[in-house]
Amino acid sequence: MTRELRQDVRYAIRGMRHSPGFTTVAVLSLALGIGANTSIFSLVNTVMLRLLPVKDPGRLVELLQKYPGEPRGNGYWTFRSYEHLSSQNHVFSGILGTAIDNRVRLQSEGYADAIGVGEFVTPNYFEVLGVEPALGRLINDKQDAVAVLSWTNWQNRFHGDPDAIGKKIIVQGQPVTVIGVAPRAFTGLRVEAQTDVWQPLPNQADTRLVLLARLKPTVTLAQAQAEMAVLYRFTIEERSFRSKDPQVRQLKVEVERAGAGLSTVRDRIGKPLLVLMSLVALLLLIACVNIANILLARGASREREMALRVGLGASRGRLLRQMLTESLVLSAAGTVAGVFVAYFLAAALIQLFASGRPHERVLLRIEPDMHVLAFTIGIAVVVGLAFGIVPALNAFRTSPESALRKANSGQTIFQRVFGRGLVSAQVALSVLLLSAGALFVRHLWDLEHTDLGFRPDHVLLITFDPSRGQRLPSRYHEMIERVQQIPGVTSVSLGSPTPLSGAGASGFASAEGFEERPADRRWISICYVSPKSFETLGIPLVAGRDFDPHDEANWKVAIVNRAFAKYYFTGRDPVGQHITLDHVTLDAEVKSYQIIGIAGNANYSEIREPLARTIYLPAFRDKEVDADHLILRTGGDPEAVAGNVRGVVREVLKTVPVLSTTTLTKQVDASILLERLVAALSGAFGALGLLLASVGLYGLLAYTVARRTTEIGIRVALGANTAYITRMVLVETFAIVAGGLIVGAPLALLCSRLAGALVPDVPLHIAGPLGIGAGVILLGALVASYVPARQAARVDPIEALRHE
């Protein structure tokens, strides 16, 4: 059996070499389909399936606080709640707490400063996880000035030197002693970022924690949920005492599995990833149908060969095995090529995710593991069987007597109808892919052309860390004046946050003469801005005045947006009125502000969310500066002045590090990262599906014309003209395409509903995308049929009849 298998494999390879055109088309088709599937599955595996490299990850759970119907919420636990839950529960063998900081400043002798990810952890962090050190020891007590390095950080900064233990590094400006190195496989709890350093938890009273726990061996998730619901009453009372939010008593605690780690993007991209997996599966199915159709056509031409082999003693089982072996060898070649496609596509996905907003950038490590290996091998086998089974069964049914009796082998009626059906199926699937691509591209276009309330063009954003230096207004005034003098700069200001950078500060507001029902009370977005901020960002000031230098001393003034004014001052002029604002900090007092102006509505948080009620407060106040972004508008390309601006910032704010430089246009693009990802990939997959369907249609028509050469020659000899022959081929083409459109249109309508349910805010109006898909398919069919139609029209009847 082994010898026969080797013979079958060698024969299959020889056959592939003898048909280079077919082999190239088949391998490339499979490479695109298998590569796309492998790369998207690798992303799904990384984000949703891969377990943490810790002891028994299946017993880890995450403790969430959330309002009913709202997304998950972790990272808001106090240390008091952590202590209460740890001491009072009977369902966990341990509860750990961690505070994750994405902007930890790392320094060590001989190396440039770097911004990394740090975790500030409770003493039992590594013990609960069951992680052992690769070198030294891990945190197990409340020492403040110690640190554990990640394996990568240890390699980069100390070149893997074991003597790094005991050395000093500087974290956030404070010297700490390295006591250990985490194992290479453990890179922290978060999926989308690698932790560089772990330190004991500081400022326990003020730090907000993420809580994970390990279930006891005999405890179920339901039992843990029931006990946490009771113990959570302590946290509710604590938060009610500290917060003025009337909705806080609606909070619930939920216990969810956390063996796959923490992820801020899993909820956002999980469902869109399922959509992408469905699309790449359709792409691979189109490739399989395409190759099956070509193999079926080749099988008809090999009918005499199969008949001869049967006549010479080969069993039908051997023929079946030979054909399946050829399919599997072809699939293996496509899979090898697909691995390279997957590698480059995965790298592109990593870069795309890393282009998000600074606080949302997803730094994924898409690495192959046993899940990806099993998926790739499994898909190679399934694909090989999928496109090879019909041609193999056709060879199995070969009748040697009838096949050898024919002067020229040809397709039976069943084979012709089945082949046309396969191409129609390709057309239907391509319509589905193209419609989906058009749907998501249109959704992205709608978002990109949403009125955001500001002008993103020609705006440069410099982000710095004011906590790392003096916050004297005089320094910042000097910086603004010097930046204003740079050629090309037209307007300069400070602000925090910047538009579409995500949620900033928030609080609760009340206004004179306005009675608000407790159920209607909502968070108010708070922005800190300097004079000329509205001019710089292109936000219209519709009433009142802007901030001016005099407000630095008398800083209890505010500007509100139209949404705020409409809600709190319906039918009244807000300018000159007073509001009170309860800042959301533990020690903040309720302050009163006088409204001096009304600004237009501008989107600071999410394009997808309704415009929030917003209040603007002075960035210069109490002889301090409360802003971490330098915002400037230029007359030309803002990136052309970026180097000069950074130089001024470093020269004036000597101890304040610059964290990032970008443009507001890029920040807008980064805020719709998910939509760009889905639109780009679905559009690309739709184009590939169209290409494969066109190749399949061309192959079928070319083969049909070649097999019907004699018939066409007779028609020409009997008086058929070129136009008639061309029309005959085109009619056959559009009959096949029409069959695909009839099947594909309802599928596209159904799948648009499913996509709308999985991806938020996707429009359900499918008529336009469906029309685009059908139109592109018809155009592709016309192009694919041109060459076969022209060949048919140029058939010489004398040459055609001579072969008969």
Image: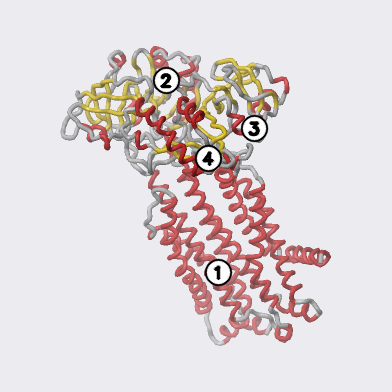
Q: Nearer the viewer, residue 226 or 194?
A: 226
Q: Do the residues under discs 2 and 1 have CB atoms within 8 angstroms?
A: no
Name the amino acid type tagged 1: Val
Disc 1 is placed on an element classified as helix
- Dot 3, crowdedness within 10 Å: few (<14), some or many (≥20)? some
Disc nearest the viewer among 3 and 1: 3
Q: Residue at x 48, y 28 (%)?
A: 82
Q: Quadrant of residue 56?
A: top right
Relative vertical location of residue 489 with respect to residue 413 in this rendering, above or below: above
Nearest the viewer among 340 and 207 is 207
Q: Amino acid at mark 3?
A: Val
- Which mark is first along the chain, 2 or 3? 3
Q: Secondary structure at mark 4?
A: helix
Instruction: Say which label, 3 or 1, has the lower sequence index.
Output: 3
Q: Is residue 757 left or right of residue 361?
A: left
Task: Point out the frontmost of discs 3 and 2.
Answer: 3
* Residue 96 image position (x, y, % from top left): 54, 30
Q: Work out how far the residue at label 2 is from the one at label 1, CA to CA, in angstroms.
A: 63 Å
Q: Which residue is mark 3?
A: 131
Query: Please, which residue is most extreme toward the right here?
Result: 3
Q: Are marks 4 and 1 in contact (CB under 8 Å)?
A: no
- Colour option used: secondary structure
Determine which residue is flagged by label 4: 353
Callout 2 amino acid: Val
Read off the residue under disc 1. 423
Read off the residue under disc 2: 483
The quadrant in which residue 230 appears is top left
Please state which of residues 650 and 283 is positioned toward the viewer in this rendering.
283
